[in-house]
Image (cartoon, grey):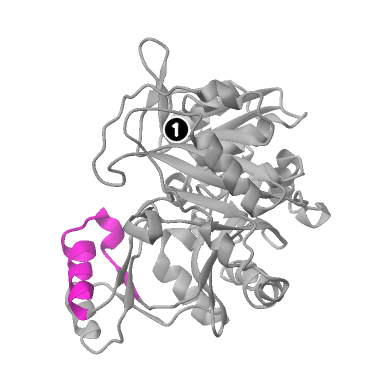
Amino acid sequence: MKVLIVGGGGREHAIAWKVAQSPKVDKLYCAPGNAGIAEVAECVNIGVMEFDKLTAFAKEQAIDLTIVGPDDPLAAGAVDAFEAAGLRVFGPRKNAAILEGSKAFSKDLMKKYGIPTAAYETFDSPEAALSYLETADMPIVLKADGLALGKGVLICNNLEEAKEGVKTLMLDKQFGSAGNRIVVEEFMTGREVSVLSFVDGRTIKIMTSAQDHKRAKDGDQGLNTGGMGTFSPSPFYTEEVDAFCKEYIYQKTVDAMAAEGREFKGIIFFGLMLTAKGPRVLEYNARFGDPETQVVLPRMKNDIVDVFEACIDGTLDQIDLQFEDNAAVCVVLASDGYPEHYEKGFKISGLEKFQDADGYYVFHAGSKFDADGDIVTNGGRVLGVTATGSDLKEARANAYKATGWVEFGNKYMRHDIGKAIDEA
């Protein structure tokens, strides 16, 4: 079969790498792809939001299955466009992708169906938000309602910071229209855990757990980013936590979406906070996490194409989802200055060392070929260096060893990815 992947980041590279292993797949395309994805797929110069061009290409090439990776095209209706063109596609429709596309929607859904989450209020005007903050407990969390590349969340320690946060989101429009509406949320404390799942509209199958590191600098300092590294599984995601979430969160979310006439087929990413009062939902994403995908998929035993097709066909209950009894750690190699200002175009060397290294992977997030055919940096997050091991400590040691194999100008990384492992 012929498969098209829409996207061009580290998540899509990990998906492409996994799809390419399927004996069902004869030809793999990726739009727009990147220099790393080009090793396993033919890259096509079409943007992720160019639905007309994407569907036309899929028809011309007789694509059997399209997988939409990023959040923006999902929220804008990419799956609907493919379905309208009579094409087979994996991912939630627009009316289901709102689970991530609007934080106000997801919070209201959780309140309506009794899914545990933080207390919150929603505001459409900065004046109303500022008035509310005058009497609110601190610290407090401000969230842009719309999509903001995983960065539209501000943790405010006092009233002054909270007022500045409202200005940043609603008046300065740092995240554009995503900040037209904001959610003001109770600040929760505890361990964060990410749990990805496959969903076919009725059945949900949970993948292995992971934990992301959002802040740019060591010790969880610096600005929020799209993610600086991750590990899987989380030692804090215990059998008790799993049992609670299966009863009160996972299936209830799928059923709630169905009850709202928004049948969800695709990936639901559950961002959880393990509080003293039990697990709470921090956020939903309607797609694979980035960089969580880079540690989850290397541990997955199944042919991923079988799972994608079962989600589309409503036969996920027939899939025995299995993961290796090992661990994986991903360290993001970024451009110094990310997530604000950074230079691009530096030649990347050492990538060939991963080719014959069993259990070591390098997933490209921001790379491209220059005029001379060399691979150069082309983004804030450049590479995700992933390694597996028998346990998390071994995987972490392996991942950091492998970061030394790669060099490029202004290379930057955190040095404490997975450090929480030592506290488990």
- Left or right: 144 in relation to 53: left
* x, y percent for residue 115: 57, 78
| Kind of residue indicated by mark 1 | Asp
* x, y percent for residue 51: 45, 36
Q: Label 1, on which residue?
A: 52
Residue at horizontal 33 percent and vertical 28 percent from the top: 409
Residue at horizontal 45 percent and vertical 79 percent from the top: 118
Q: Judge the density around disc 1: few (<14), some (14-19), many (≥20) Cα neighbours within 10 Å.
A: some
Depth order, front residue of 191/422:
422
Residue at horizontal 71 percent and vertical 39 percent from the top: 305
Figure quadrant of residue 146: bottom left
Considering only vertical position in the picture, is 11 above or below 195? Answer: above
* x, y percent for residue 125: 21, 73
- Left or right: 272 in relation to 133: right
Figure quadrant of residue 201: bottom right
Depth order, front residue of 249/139:
139
Q: Quadrant of the N terminus?
A: top right
Residue 175 magenta-highlighted: yes
Residue at horizontal 33 percent and vertical 24 percent from the top: 346
Q: Main secondary structure of the magenta part?
A: helix
The residue range painted magenta reads 159-184
* x, y percent for residue 351: 52, 24
